[in-house]
Amino acid sequence: MTFLTGIARSKRDPKIISSGPSMVPLADRLARGLGWFSIGLGALELFAPRHVTRFLGMRGREPLVQAFGAREIASGILSLSIDKQAGLWARVAGDALDLAVLRQAHRPGNWKRDNVSIAMLMVGGIMALDVLAAQGAHTKHARHSSDARDYSDRSGFPAGLTAARRTGAQDAVASDKRGLLAP
């Protein structure tokens, strides 16, 4: 018997030949990590906007930071959902908005301009990860045109449309004989 990570295994135990659907791909792990990061950052922006604006020299912009925090939380939750592509692309769009606001704060009169530069670099790096994750999720989870299903030969009736019509006609005749159909 060998001991692997505290679990006793017999030599007769099955070996993993190939990974199955339970193995989480890198794109999904990255999406999950970015989703949780987004929720954490959004909570910081939503509940402590004064600290964020003071760090960036943007006092008076607390409502904007709170709105960005709510957006971060929403895109983070969406990134953790089944439709992670939408959440990741929402994060990319949010990163573009963040960079636009940070660029505005990166003015010569801002005494926290160095902090804004650091924040811009961080947002740019996270944006690159967001784009990679979104593209990876699209590649992994996108439905291709060859996967399109053709249901044109189906009617929705188990025995077919002709049998359903015949049964309906027989029911109508039987109802008419019993006097259930009004003239």
Image: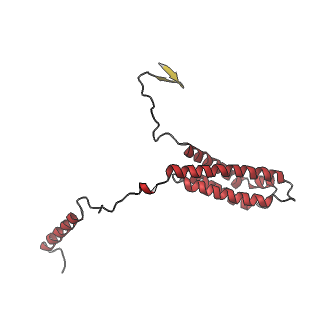
Viewer-proximal residue, 48 or 72?
72
Q: Is residue 145 left or right of residue 98?
A: left
Q: Position of residue 38 (x, y in %)?
A: 64, 50
- Relative to 17, say whether 174 is above or below: below
- The residue lying at 24 percent from left, 62 percent from top is 160
Q: Is residue 54 left or right of residue 12?
A: right
Q: Position of residue 11 (x, y in %)?
A: 43, 21
In this orientation, does residue 158 appear? yes
For this orientation, the residue located farthest to the bottom is 183
- The residue lying at 83 percent from left, 54 percent from top is 113
For this orientation, the residue located farthest to the left is 177
Q: Position of residue 44 (x, y in %)?
A: 70, 51
- Quarter of the figure that contains the C terminus: bottom left
- Relative to 58, say whether 25 is above or below: above
For the image, the number of numbered tags is 0
Q: Is residue 107 left or right of residue 142?
A: right
Q: Position of residue 175 (x, y in %)?
A: 16, 71
* Rendering quarter of residue 73: bottom right
In this orientation, does residue 39 appear? no
